[in-house]
Amino acid sequence: MKRTLTIFATLMICIFAVLGSASPAFAQDATPTATPPDLLLYTTYPSQVIELGEAVTVKLTLRAVGKAQTVQMEMAEIPEGWTATFRGGGRVIQAVYVGADSSETVDLNLTPPKDTSAGAYSFVVRARGEDLKAELPITLTVQEKVPASLTFKTDLPILKGSPTTTFRYSTTLKNEGDEDLTVNLTADTPSGFLAKFTVAGQEVTSFPLLANQSKSISIEIDPIVEVEAGRYPITVYANGGEVQATLELTAEVTGQHNLTVSGPDGRLSGRANAGRETTLQVIVTNSGTAAAQGVEMSATAPTGWTVSFEPEVIAEIPAGGQADVTVKLKPAEKAVAGDYVVTIRARPADGSNKVADFRITVTTSTLWGVVGIAVIAIAVGVVALAVTRFGRR
């Protein structure tokens, strides 16, 4: 019994000893650790490419963590001949106050000497607080200025069309240099053509073109007179001060037929007898610049009439040529004497109808007149005979 109590007492002492040693550790873990103060210095673009002789402004950001700071600004490293200036609030500064857990911006102006050559230049900016400091390396790569240059391109420099087609070319003009330009557009066009330039839906003759920028230009070449078939060269010029680009275009006019239908000497009239076939001569003339192929003849006539053609289809009428067609007309048997209109059409295989209205004067047959007179004469004779015979009685 005494032995058992001794063991129990020993266990209890060990338990209280363990709990007593654990309690201080728990309290220590619950106490937050304070963040040490810090000073941050950074820029969004620490490495830049500039042109020869160009000054540059680098925007710096200062951030004080945990403690407000009055920060002195200086250059820890700068190439020979370069000048550095810190600016803030529109003035040259040497220090900036940064509140606790806040940020401030400073402009660093870097100006190269006049005899700077192309290459990479390294800078180190230092910010010194009361007991903290931060450094920021910056690299500027100086390259020679790209000379002004224009390029003028199109995927389809040759377009085909008829003498009435407006030729539209889609082109791209690019400023290959590092300077902004004002571009003037002109064109050398053949006689009878007019050029028009459109940018973003607006008709223009000049427009600004920024450095390394491209613009789409629609060039319209419009025939303002009837031109003959052939290839017509057009040269378009883009002038931007001392630089110029040219673009060679071609408008290929394929020609177009132009048909007219008439009678001999331009007459559009004829005569016909009711119920009898009559021939009418028609001339189909092509005054265009291309041959008319497969010209089909047709007509619209009054009801009961028949119309046919010899030939019904003209194989070809060359440019400046003509074809003679014989039209066979047969008015209706009971057509009343008078004037009628017959519409004659000539339709090429690749075009629309060309129409002419012919006035046809219809007369009735003289045989019916003789028959009528004979009937009248017989009737008069019968009446006279009857009067003679019955009058005597």
Image: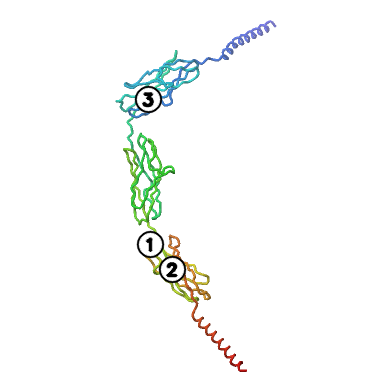
Question: Would you name the residue on which mark 1 appears?
Answer: 287
289 and 360: which is toward the camera: 360
- Which label is found at residue 139? 3
**Quadrant housing the C terminus:** bottom right
- Element class at badge 2: loop
Which tag is nearer the camera, tag 3 or tag 2?
Answer: 2
**Callout 3: SS:** strand
The quadrant holding residue 209 is: top left
Q: Rounded to the nearest whole Å, what is the CA distance between mark 3 and mark 2?
A: 91 Å
Q: Position of residue 307 (x, y in %)?
A: 47, 71
Query: Contact, CB < 8 Å: mark 1 with mark 2?
Result: no
Query: Which amino acid, mark 1?
Result: Ser
193 left or right, relative to 38: left
Q: Position of residue 349 (x, y in %)?
A: 43, 62
102 or 123: nearer the viewer: 102
- For disc 1, the neighbor class at 10 Å (few under 14, some 14 to 19, many from 20) is some
Q: Quadrant of residue 59?
A: top left
SS class, disc 1:
loop
The image position of residue 286, as x and y in percent, is: 39, 63
In the rendered image, the residue lying farthest to the top is 2
Who's the residue at 36% across and 64% down the image?
Answer: 321
**Spot occupied by residue 83 in the image (x, y as percentages of width and height):** 35, 21
Residue 284 vs residue 43, the one in the foreground = 284
Q: Are marks 3 and 2 in contact (CB under 8 Å)?
A: no
Amino acid beneath label 3:
Thr
Disc nearer the start of the sequence (1/2): 2
Please name the amino acid that badge 2 sits on. Answer: Leu
| Disc nearest the viewer among 1 and 2 | 2
Labelled disc at residue 268: 2
